[in-house]
Amino acid sequence: MSEIKLKITGMTCGHCVSAATKALEKVPGVEKAEVTLKPGAAVVHGDAPVAALIAAVAEEGYEAEQE
């Protein structure tokens, strides 16, 4: 299992964190996602493609990039 770190921008509250976490955890290959509001980051555990993770976050209205 690998660990993928993402920088996420656009989140402003706990609801945003929850939405991003749920979106990431729905991606096939993700075992667990830990999202933090400050500094706007996620650590994803699993073997999902980075592009799929970024797309899932974008669908929720936030921007993401691999750190």
Image (cartoon, rainbow, N blue to C red):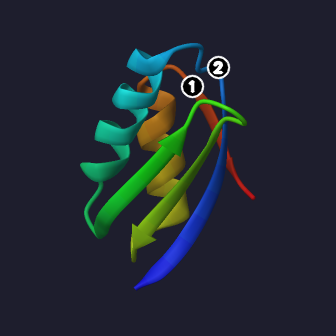
Q: Position of residue 20 (x, y in %)?
A: 42, 34
Q: Nearer the viewer, residue 25 or 56?
A: 25
Distance between the alpha carbons at the discs numbered 2 and 1? 5 Å
Along the horizontal axis of the image, is 15 left or right of 9?
A: left
Q: Amino acid at mark 1?
A: Tyr
Specify few, some or many for label 2: CA neighbours under 10 Å numbering under 14, 14-19, or 20 or more: few
Q: Residue at x 69, y 48 (%)?
A: 65
Residue occupied by mark 2 = 10
Residue 26 vertical position relative to residue 20 in the rendered view, above or below: below
- Which secondary structure lies at badge 2? loop
Q: Nearer the viewer, residue 58 or 42?
A: 42
Q: Are marks 2 and 1 in contact (CB under 8 Å)?
A: yes
Rendered-image quadrant of the C terminus: bottom right
Q: Position of residue 50 (x, y in %)?
A: 54, 62
Rendered-image quadrant of the N terminus: bottom left
Residue occupied by mark 1 = 62
Q: Position of residue 37 (x, y in %)?
A: 59, 30
Q: Position of residue 25 (x, y in %)?
A: 29, 51
Q: Residue at x 59, y 13 (%)?
A: 12
